[in-house]
Image (spheres, coloured by chain):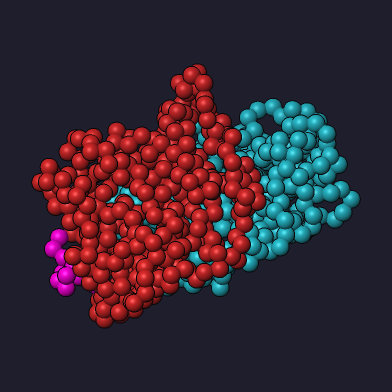
Chain colours: A cyan, B red
Amino acid sequence: MGPDSSQDAQTVSQLGEFGLIGRVTSGRVQSPGTVLGPGDDAAVLAAPDGRVVATTDVLVEQVHFRLDWSTPHQVGRKAVAVNLSDIAAMGAVPTGLLVGLGCAPDLPAKVADELLDGMWEEAQQLGIGIIGGDMVSASSLTISVTALGDLQGREPVTRAGARPGDVVAVAGRLGWSAAGLAVLGRGFRSPVAVVGAHRVPEPPYAAGPQAALAGATSMVDTSDGLLADLGHIAAASQVGIDVRTEQVEVPQRLTEVASALGADARHWVLTGGEDQALAATFPAGQPLPEGWREIGVVAEGEGVTVDGAQYEGPIGWEHWR
Amino acid sequence: MGPDSSQDAQTVSQLGEFGLIGRVTSGRVQSPGTVLGPGDDAAVLAAPDGRVVATTDVLVEQVHFRLDWSTPHQVGRKAVAVNLSDIAAMGAVPTGLLVGLGCAPDLPAKVADELLDGMWEEAQQLGIGIIGGDMVSASSLTISVTALGDLQGREPVTRAGARPGDVVAVAGRLGWSAAGLAVLGRGFRSPVAVVGAHRVPEPPYAAGPQAALAGATSMVDTSDGLLADLGHIAAASQVGIDVRTEQVEVPQRLTEVASALGADARHWVLTGGEDQALAATFPAGQPLPEGWREIGVVAEGEGVTVDGAQYEGPIGWEHWR
């Protein structure tokens, strides 16, 4: 956005609500599907499928992110990524974002600018933009993102369609964000590979629609951790899921980090949240789409087991508990 | 929702994220257009027009509402109303809501229940529901609502279409919320008519689509105050707008309240925000739709004048200023 140095010293209070809104959108390129972008009472977005997919996630400073661990740009990317990942998990492609930003009046405008830059960067990877939003005073930096998406004629892939005999597969990284969080929690800033994975997830966006095209019977994004999110599929589908650890890759890099910290890399892979990998079930006996790897099976029953047994230890994250 | 008395004593922390999410949706009736409601990675909503209208507003405790002035139920209704009003201001009808709720772990579950009850009540007036959301820990009670809507084949009515010669008209109440706020600010709780108007606006939802059908050339909701929001139309349309005070009704009730408080009722009508009335411009020489009343004219020029002169005093509300 290139604010000059006098603007760098500004706070959002000095910039004002309308000044900040101008900086959200100034010079940005909206997607071809944006009928009406920011600046009116509401935005208008093409919904060619005749149905719209919609999801909201809220991130709060000190709860979901720390500005001493991540730059505002990284936080912006993550806030968008966690929402776009939910769109992918339905088998849809994203079409636009709305952003509600709450911040203290004395927040440097530069921080808000970088946050919004990060949001735009992540969005534009997928050819979409921020089509609307709201900016308000709040004691904590609070970022509410709503993502909209299009099913392109496909049926949504819900959590409820897994059937006994299906195979369970994942796409994307698992355990990297948990490893990065463990490193940051010990006061380290490296290895960059895992710390970076915690700061900005890399959801396998394309794998969602590809899974839908390949006939995935259920899908979820692993925001809470693999076992916890497979538990959502098991509950919604009224089936049991068994994860076969011989099929679950534990990357060498995570093993090294775990070893240095006295932690368990496999635990990160099975239970670590925030990598925004996708987990899905597919009919057995057919090739998985590119980027998907088999990790288990669906059976009659309920709940999630690991190698046929209950997993020892906490398996996920729940707010307020 | 009928939680029993043992639940009344619970906090959201004791209830847990998934328990609270269950209470958002349990026993609720979704609209026929809801393809997939809450409980999956994202919701899916019919978008019969092939375009979707979308808007977000965030409300923060102590900034936008006070729980010693309004009940949680009233706050919930207002949080939804301000968003649905934005959908109406595009000439659209609402189709669904997503809600991001941030609250402290020790918030009584009863408060969250009442808040969500209020949201549902306002939504169901228009036949829609909460189709998705997110619940997170936050230091202040923060409510982020995204409303989606459908244009039913009409073109969106933006802020940018007013033309010299058009008439300016409003639908809905003006000044009532400001009067209520003034009363509350002096420590009073009555008259109920104005205090209630501040607590829960009554946007003229149907007047938005009706204005679109009648050929409105521009429209805005008066969340910031009549003159400020007409200023948005004037700026976007590159025209001037003159409000004729002889046409602007100042309700007797507001005059009485203003007299008791030593305030100016006309100022409330012209500049008070949060009534969520609609203001629009229409081609001259044709009857206005039901519920709309003429208050001024569009001319060449810029900005908003009152009886041909600049208005004395502050005309609106801007965050952080």
Q: Is residue A117 above or below residue A181?
A: below
In this image, A57 relative to B215: left or right? right
Q: Is any part of residue A80 visible from this angle?
A: no
Tell me where residue A121 appears, x and y as whole percent.
51, 64
Q: Residue furthest right?
A: A285
Quadrant in which residue B62 is drawn: top left
Tell me where residue A19 appears, x and y as whole percent.
31, 64
Query: Magenta part mainly helix, strand or loop?
Result: loop
What residue appears at the point 20 percent right and 68 percent down from the top-left corner? B244
Tell me where residue B171 appears, x and y as whole percent.
34, 59
What residue appears at the point 39 percent right and 65 percent down from the top-left corner? B289
Q: Residue furthest top?
A: B6
Q: Is any part of residue B277 visible from this angle?
A: yes
Q: Residue furthest left?
A: B262
Q: Is residue A195 magenta?
A: no
Locate the C terminus of chain B and report the quarter of the image it occupies.
bottom left
Q: Which residues are magenta?
A: B303-313
Numbered-mark total: 0
Quadrant in which residue A165 is drawn: top right
What residue appears at the point 54 percent right and 51 percent down from the top-left corner? B96
Tell me where residue B6 appears, x and y as whole percent.
50, 18
Nearest the eye: B261 or B137: B261
Quadrant in which residue A26 is drawn: bottom left
Nearest the eye: B221 or B126: B126
In this image, B184 relative to A209: left or right? left
Nearest the eye: A176 or A115: A115
Q: Is residue A215 above or below residue A38?
A: above
What residue appears at the point 17 percent right and 44 percent down from the top-left corner? B257
